[in-house]
Amino acid sequence: MELKGKVALVTGGARRLGRELSLALGQAGADLVVNYNRSAGPAQELCEQLEALGRRAVPVQADVSSSDDVARLIEVTTEVFGHLDVLVNNASTFENVPLLDITEESWDRVMGVNLKGPFLMSQAAEPLLRMHRRGLILNLTDLAGIETWPAYGHHGVSKAGVIHLTRVLARAFAPDIRVNAIAPGTVLPPEDYTPAQVESLRGRTPLQRIGTPADVVRAMMYLIEADYVTGQVLVVDGGRLLV
Ligand SMILES: NC(=O)c1ccc[n+]([C@@H]2O[C@H](COP(=O)([O-])OP(=O)(O)OC[C@H]3O[C@@H](n4cnc5c(N)ncnc54)[C@H](OP(=O)(O)O)[C@@H]3O)[C@@H](O)[C@H]2O)c1
């Protein structure tokens, strides 16, 4: 898919990895809907940066775990652009809670953002993505959805759900919309990680480096190009899953 003149929507697109994915899509020629939840300032700044590149870009606040907010986000996308070519379900929480200490509230929040969010977004965006018979959904999952990490139990369960959601949607939405997932290893450590924690992750990675957002951008660009690939999970982890 050539991105020039296309429209992309990135959830949680204002900061960290979502920002890098949004910028890369804009640099490749796409107009952008930058969804944010709390990061209004960074979303506005990013849209200004995208407009300076000659793109159209609109920041839209929405909580992806709320069907009302998701409906409004898609309404704005329809009003501003009239169609959508690429939906990147990037928004996420990353909660570190021992399994036995997970509260019902925390379980519901994590499932709401990480799993219900991509479902609601995909369901609501489907008519717009189908319009030109060439739509693409990219779901950000995690190694935690493939491996078993007891300290991130509900996070891992939600991300495993995203992998199955990817496959089910790929079948349900074919042939007009492809649906794939990317499972990064660590590309941007959580902001509270110590240098020792980061070094320990690097040490456990066969390719001997922490990933970068650019590694995920390359995977995204491949999946945008690869128009015979659907229902797949592309692991971008320096080989960590092999260990
Ligand atoms: N970072 C990594 O190394 C890594 C590794 C494996 C997988 N991943 C996956 O890659 C994606 C991005 O990673 P990240 O580290 O950049 O994520 P992150 O910093 O944990 O969160 C990304 C964004 O999600 C948004 N968000 C949270 N709750 C939301 C809600 N209810 N509605 C809408 N947006 C919401 C936040 O937006 P606001 O700031 O606007 O509130 C936040 O900026 C995630 O899906 C993550 O699981 C990342």
Image (tube, rainbow, N blue to C red):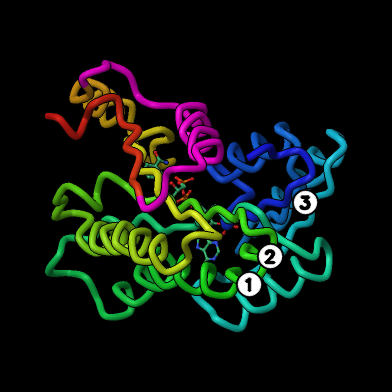
Looking at the image, which residue is at 55% across and 53% down? Answer: 136
Q: Position of residue 132 (x, y in %)?
A: 69, 59
Residue range corresponding to the magenta coloring: 206-231
- Disc 3/disc 1 C-alpha distance (Å): 27 Å
Vertical position of residue 101 compared to residue 203: above or below: below
- Residue at the image point whose x is 83% and y is 42% from the top: 55
For label 2, the SS is loop
Residue 160 placed where, x, y %?
26, 58
- Residue 210, percent across and down? 35, 24
Mark 2 touches mark 1? (CB < 8 Å): yes
Q: State yes or no: residue 213 in magenta.
A: yes
Is residue 29 one of those drawn in magenta? Answer: no
> Which label sits in the foreground, 3 or 1?
1
Sequence-earlier tag: 3 or 2 = 3
Tell me which amino acid carries mark 2. Answer: Met
Q: Nearer the viewer, mark 3 or mark 2?
A: 2
Q: CA distance from mark 3 to mark 2?
A: 28 Å
> Within 8 Å of ligand 1, the CB of disc 1?
no
Mark 3, Cα crowd under 10 Å, few <14 / some 14-19 / many 20+, is some
Look at the picture and state if 65 lies above or below 171: below
Check contact, mark 3 vs mark 2: CB within 8 A: no
Q: Residue furthest top?
A: 208
- Which residue is denoted by mark 1 in the rendering? 127
Label of residue 44 in the image: 3
Query: Tag 1: residue type?
Result: Pro
Q: Which quarter of the rendered picture does the N terminus lie within?
A: top right
**How far from the left and from the top, in percent, is residue 87?**
58, 56
Given residues 183 and 93, the one toward you in this image is 183
Q: Which residue is mark 2?
A: 131
Residue, x 59% and y 56% (percent of image)? Answer: 135
